[in-house]
């Protein structure tokens, strides 16, 4: 075991290398390109076996990933943001093929306006596709989760592709200490893929995905995917136990921090949760019983586990780093559906939208979200959804609008 | 960072990180890092870790309720700026496409249509003119011209080529 400094991208590449992937269809897009650069360097230098092929788009890349997985080899691919959306038709299609592989997504906000920094709207667009989804908060988790994801995808009770998500910039380009497991230990945890009846071959045509008419067979195939995804809850727990046994690190489907004796809980996904943990340490210093739940598994959603962890709590502040336009925070909706009507469900489920396009969330904002939730608990009234957005930020927008206004006048447009 | 990172571990990190780029580049970087390390030595300890904010006594964030504004104001559209004209992207070019007007058939449309940067303008007489301030030298026009009337010339050889 070696301890070294790795970016999230480097950690994902090491995950692929240690998993001994056979095939990597690739297409560059910021902020994930370093993953495929690193893998291609290793393949070039002979440090890694396997084949990396550059496709002409993410749509083709996902097709190649599904096609290769249908031959029974181990496949890794990576994308981000607009790339994931460009591939979206095939994201749904290859998930329906029931061929397992792993796709790393490096989260980045979506157009328009275009940006490079992270939020989770990109990966949540794939939420209903049949891909399972695991969200990471540290570079170590990126490596560990990539290994776990192959085992989850390839399990015969599941056999669905898995997206491993990390936040662009905050993880992709940030170096953290990462323990690189020994190759032998990884081989013991993740043996070669046994593809059973996955035997698609060139020149021996079989029907990889049938057309069905009439809703009945369609319902069967789609619901089977759903049942397989639900199976993944139990399989994931087995895998995380086996991983902990082999490597000493436990990655539960929901990370729980200071939650046992907490009255009020933050619930959020991704690496901004590490900021919440630092704020919770300060809140605890001030005698406030606040904790954190961070679902790593988003699909399948660990509903029962979440119900158990939240039973008897007084208030929940859901912090969504995403925005379903015309509805609100996606995780907030998911939690509401999981908690409604459950015995012991917290009476207050407050919604906060923060971190869109990589906008920071300060310690003071975490303190205030805890405070707003506590006041709601006392008054029994759920507060309206709150965008984390300051007076100074609005001033900045006014300044930008003033500049744009002058330019429109110069062009002779109506201001 | 001085005092936290030793000179030896800095050198080791540079060697590990840049190994694939070859010994010459590694040596150059080691030299630069060493001189920067010496230069900053007197200032070691100037940048310290910030103190934790207290949750018992903090300034609450100045949150505002974002007001609705009509799309005529709130859409992210800037219709002027013209910055792409001001930026001389032609400086990126290493190869220059040069039109041989004796061979050019004045078809007027092939090179100008294929140019991904709209850097080939066409005169009223159907004659293509390359805007070298904005041509990035992708050579797509060279590849597309059916009468092979566009040549590719290395930028550093342009002077002697055009002079000779």
Image (spheres, grey):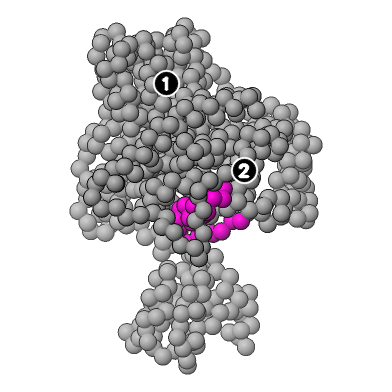
Asked if one can make out residue B9 in the rendered structure from this viewpoint, the answer is: yes
Q: Over which residues does the magenta segment extend?
A: A51-75
Determine crowd level at label 1: few under 14, some 14-19, many 20+ residues with C-alpha closer than 10 A. few
Q: In the rendered structure, find residue A305 and report the number of the disc placed on it.
A: 1
Q: Position of residue A167 (x, y in %)?
A: 49, 37
Which residue is at 38% across, 35% downward? A227
Q: Is residue B65 above or below residue B96?
A: above
> Which residue is more in the foreground, A125 or A33?
A125
> Which residue is more in the foreground, B77 or A72?
A72
Q: Chain of mark 2?
A: A
Q: Quadrant of residue A116?
A: top left
Is A347 magenta? The answer is no
> Which residue is more in the foreground, A57 or A329?
A57
The residue pinned by badge 2 equals: A192
Q: Position of residue A125 (x, y in %)?
A: 36, 42
Which residue is at 25% across, 34% downward? A327
Image quadrant containing the N terminus of chain A = top right
Question: Marks 1 and 2: CB-CB under 8 Å?
Answer: no
Which residue is at 49% across, 86% downward? B148
Q: Quadrant of residue A7?
A: top right
Say whether disc 1 or disc 2 marks the residue closer to the N-terminus: 2
Which residue is at 54% across, 40% downward? A150
């Amino acid at each position: 075991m070696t301890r070294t400094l790795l970016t999230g991208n480097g950690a994902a590449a090491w995950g692929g290398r240690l998993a001994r992937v056979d095939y990597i269809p690739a297409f560059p897009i910021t902020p994930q390109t370093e993953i495929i650069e690193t893998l291609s360097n290793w393949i070039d230098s002979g440090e890694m076996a396997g084949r990396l092929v550059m496709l002409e788009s993410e749509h083709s890349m996902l097709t190649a990933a599904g096609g290769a997985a249908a031959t029974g080899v181990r496949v890794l691919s990576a994308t981000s943001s607009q790339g994931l959306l460009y591939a979206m038709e095939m994201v749904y299609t290859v998930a329906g093929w029931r061929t397992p592989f792993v796709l790393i997504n490096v989260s980045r906000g979506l157009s328009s306006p275009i940006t490079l920094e992270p939020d989770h709207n990109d990966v949540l667009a794939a939420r209903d596709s049949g891909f399972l989804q695991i969200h990471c908060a540290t570079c170590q988790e990126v490596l560990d989760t990539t290994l776990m994801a192959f085992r989850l995808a390839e399990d015969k009770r599941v056999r669905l592709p898995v997206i491993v998500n990390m936040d662009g910039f905050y993880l992709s380009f940030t170096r953290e200490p990462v323990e690189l497991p020994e190759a032998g230990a990884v081989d013991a945890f993740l043996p070669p893929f046994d593809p059973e009846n996955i035997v698609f071959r060139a020149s021996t045509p079989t029907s990889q995905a049938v057309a069905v008419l009439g809703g009945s067979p369609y319902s069967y195939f789609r619901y089977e995917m759903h049942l397989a995804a639900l199976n993944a809850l139990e399989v994931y727990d087995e895998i995380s136990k086996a991983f902990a046994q082999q490597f000493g690190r436990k990655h539960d489907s929901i990370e729980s921090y200071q939650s046992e004796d907490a009255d009020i809980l933050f619930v959020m996904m991704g690496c901004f949760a590490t900021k919440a943990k630092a704020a919770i340490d300060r809140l605890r210093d001030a005698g406030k019983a606040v904790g954190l739940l961070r679902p790593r598994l988003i699909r399948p959603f660990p509903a029962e586990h979440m119900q158990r962890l939240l039973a008897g709590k007084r208030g929940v502040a859901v912090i969504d780093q995403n925005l379903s336009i015309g509805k609100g925070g996606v995780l907030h909706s998911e939690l509401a559906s999981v908690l409604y009507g459950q015995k012991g469900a917290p009476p207050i489920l407050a919604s906060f939208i923060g971190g869109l396009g990589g906008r920071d969330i300060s310690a003071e904002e975490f303190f205030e979200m805890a405070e707003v939730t506590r006041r709601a608990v006392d008054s029994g009234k759920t507060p309206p959804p709150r965008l984390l957005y300051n007076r100074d930020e609005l001033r900045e927008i006014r300044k930008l609008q003033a500049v744009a206004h002058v330019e429109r006048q110069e062009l002779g447009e109506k201001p | 960072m001085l005092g936290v990172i030793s000179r030896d571990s800095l050198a080791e990190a540079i060697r590990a990180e840049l190994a694939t780029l070859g010994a010459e580049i590694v040596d150059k970087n080691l030299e630069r890092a060493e001189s920067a390390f010496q230069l900053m030595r007197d200032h070691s300890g100037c940048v310290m870790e910030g103190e934790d904010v207290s949750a018992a006594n903090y300034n609450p964030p100045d949150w505002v309720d974002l007001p609705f504004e009509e799309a005529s104001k709130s859409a992210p559209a800037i219709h002027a700026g013209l910055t792409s004209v001001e930026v001389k992207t032609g400086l990126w070019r290493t190869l220059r496409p040069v039109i041989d007007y004796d061979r050019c058939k004045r078809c007027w449309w092939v090179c100008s249509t294929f140019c991904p940067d709209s850097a080939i303008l066409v005169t009223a007489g159907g004659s293509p003119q390359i805007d070298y301030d904005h041509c990035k030298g992708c050579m797509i026009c060279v590849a597309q011209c059916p009468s092979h009337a566009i040549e590719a010339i290395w930028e550093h050889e342009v002077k002697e080529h055009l002079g000779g």
